[in-house]
Amino acid sequence: MVPPAVSPEALHAARTSVAARLLANQPTLLAFIRRRLGHSAASERNADDVFATTLRRSDALVRANALLAELSDAALMALASTISHRAILESSRQAERARRVRASAAERSRAQDGTAGSTPRDGASDLPDAIRAELSEDDLAILVLRLDDRNWSAIAAALGTTPAGAHRRYYRALKALMSATAVRDACDPSTRPPPTR
């Protein structure tokens, strides 16, 4: 059934209303998201990312059918919880794919170095603490894929996103790397330029 035509003003009002109601319930939704993520694995950044996805997808649904703005608070929260849960499942699948990609890249690297029979190592453990703290598994995975000369379509397929999404995530990972490197350089006297006279 096609939803009835809605004026631009009414659609804007519907979208604003749903966004305001979800933001008013943000603490409750974030608590739900953290429980679903699992306390040990959940970072605040992951929970915020899922909440942002929930807002974006809820807005898309309201744009498609403004009548969703008329849902009761309980029904709207149930819808938002379902959207959040699906976003968590997608994120979990992407993290697993990224983990497999990293393991495969590490295996290829060991094979090229002639150390395929040696004990596997996590390449991230060689990074300084400041960098490891800044880079997520997704960040590391997309950087490895791009350094492996994969095109955006191949990277998108490996991470379960679109080429445009992969491109955005790559530049976000680069920014995180530059930020972490700046922190490291600020703390490491050997990386500072010599004093000028």
Image: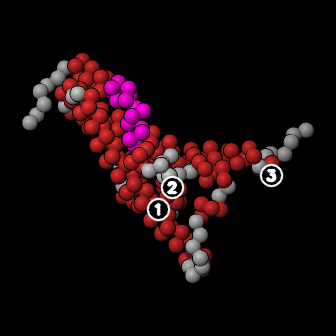
Question: Depth check: 100 or 161 in front?
Answer: 100
Question: Depth check: 74 or 100 in front?
Answer: 74
The quarter holding residue 79 reads: top left
The quarter holding residue 106 reads: bottom right
- Mark 2 vs mark 3: which is more N-terminal? 2
Secondary structure state at the residue bearing disc 3: helix
Say which amino acid is labelled 2: Glu
Quadrant holding the N terminus? top left
Picture residue at 60% right of the left edge, 79% below the top: 118
- Residue 108 percent across, percent down from the top left: 52, 72
Say which amino acid is labelled 3: Ser
Is 45 situated above or below 27? below
Question: In the image, is 117 to the left or to the right of 12?
Answer: right
**Which residue in the protein does label 1 denote?**
99
Say if mark 1 contacts mark 2, CB within 8 Å: yes
Secondary structure state at the residue bearing disc 2: helix
Magenta stretch containing residue 106, yes or no?
no
Question: In the image, is 98 to the left or to the right of 173?
Answer: left
- 2 vs 3, front mark: 2
Q: Is residue 197 visible?
A: yes
Q: Residues within 10 Å of mark 1 (few under 14, many from 20)?
A: some
Magenta stretch containing residue 22, yes or no?
yes
User: Bounds of the magenta span?
Assistant: 19-33
Task: Measure the C-alpha gap from mark 1 to mark 2.
Answer: 7 Å
Residue extending farthest to the top is: 9
Picture residue at 53% right of the left edge, 52% below the top: 136
**Which residue in the protein does label 3 denote?**
190
Question: In the image, is 97 to the left or to the right of 70?
Answer: right
Secondary structure state at the residue bearing disc 1: helix
Say if mark 2 contacts mark 3, CB within 8 Å: no
